[in-house]
Amino acid sequence: MFHAVIMAGGSGTRFWPASRSTFPKQFLRLGGSRTLIQSTVDRIAGLIPLERTRIVTNQQLVGLVREQLPELPAVCVLGEPCKRDTAPCIALAAGLAYRQDPDAIQVVMPSDHVIQTDADFQAGLRVAERLVLDRPERIVTFGIRPTYPATAFGYIQQDLSRPVSLTGASQRAGHVESSPNVVPTAVQQFREKPTLQVAQEFVRSGEYLWNSGIFVWRAKTILDAIRLYAGEIMGPIDKIVAAAGSSNFAAVFAEQFPLIQGRSIDYAVMEKYPEVVVVPAPFAWDDVGNWNSLARLVPADADGNHVVGEHLSLQSQNCVVQASGNHVVVIAGVSNLVVVQTPDATLIADRDQEELVRQIVPALQSRRPDLV
């Protein structure tokens, strides 16, 4: 059976001031009626039931997850007592899923991406599921066809000489598996975030995809892989999983999880595992990495401004504006700005210098910790 793991940690730096350490990006509504984490759960509706959907987050965010997703069983929300990166998170979720269902196939995904459409996403998952059913030792990941030489993403190099057939998938995957643009291949290598020059070479080659961070695998397969390549993680994880459902689960979790050394799943497993297949994503994807992302999510007005909330624009062009509540943001005679208003802080930044936003949180940490 299909199970879902939604990774919902985060520190809330790139969408400051709307996003904070206690209210990171996945809890925001960015141009839609639902928050990013709500949309992530909506995306798998009808394919994976809520009781087989597990959200792994920070302990301090458990209440917020339950508030935004009241329909999710409380036992399906796990609050890590400390940050330990993605490999321990995935190992824990896989261990719990395997205990519940030894044949579990998991989709693991971040909680803060924008994906269109739900139907295309589910069709892609069906392709990945078929690949795993055909060869249970496979790990499947989704790659995004690059539209520009991004330096903020990791890359996956496809081995185009080794396409992977979807045996028996036609009835399950429909139009997706027959598309000439969606041909699964073996992975040649994973590459970390490149320089601009290297990213340009990647895009020109046609061999590279952006790493989406979305995976499909059998729970047993990823547990075996972590045990093989990062076995030190599994001692505490095994103890936590063994305590699941007992009255001392919380105590064991709080005691054992901090003993793990944090590692990303890419470093721990993906870069070493020999049976990784990449599927070019049959869905539109955006990791909404900073406020400029609103320009891709919110239609522009006649002057090229992308605005959410109450506003007035006078002779202003190419701005990104987000207002909250009944507060009116007025932009007059300006261009190329990001303007974000919240009840206790306001951001004004040059759109071309928007990466400076990441420096705001550390700069405010000692002066105004209440704002981060």
Image (cartoon, rainbow, N blue to C red):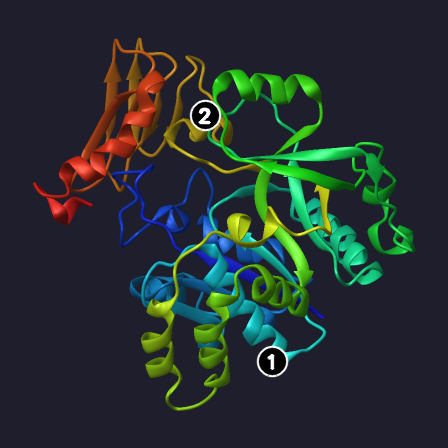
Residue drawn at x 47%, y 66% as measured from the top left = 233
Label 1 Cα neighbours within 10 Å, binned few <14 / some 14-19 / many ≥20:
some
User: What is the secondary structure assignment of the residue under circle 1?
Assistant: helix
Residue 343, percent from left and from top:
18, 42
Residue drawn at x 29%, y 64% as measured from the top left = 60
Point out the tag, 2 or 1, that comes first from the N-terminus. Answer: 1
The residue lying toward the viewer, choosing from 309 and 173, is: 173
Residue assigned mark 2? 295
Disc number for residue 99: 1
Q: Is residue 51 visible?
A: no
Disc number for residue 337: none
Residue 255, percent from left and from top:
32, 77
* 147 to 64, vertically: above or below: above
Residue 276, percent from left and from top:
71, 49
Task: Classify residue 187 as left or right of residue 307.
Answer: right
**Amino acid beneath label 2:** Ala
Residue that sits furthest to the left in the current view: 367
* 93 to 270, vertically: above or below: below
Q: Is residue 318 visible?
A: yes
The residue lying toward the viewer, choosing from 197 and 60, is: 197
Give the image quarter of residue 117. Answer: top right
User: What is the secondary structure assignment of the residue under circle 2?
Assistant: helix
Q: Is label 2 or label 1 in front?
A: 1
Label 2 Cα neighbours within 10 Å, binned few <14 / some 14-19 / many ≥20:
some
Cα–Cα span, label 2 and label 1: 44 Å
**Amino acid beneath label 1:** Arg
Residue drawn at x 26%, y 22% as measured from the top left = 349
Residue that sits furthest to the bottom in the current view: 247
The residue lying toward the viewer, choosing from 234 and 71, is: 234
Task: Classify residue 49 as left or right of residue 67.
Answer: right
Residue drawn at x 42%, y 40% as measured from the top left = 30
Task: Report the label total.
Answer: 2
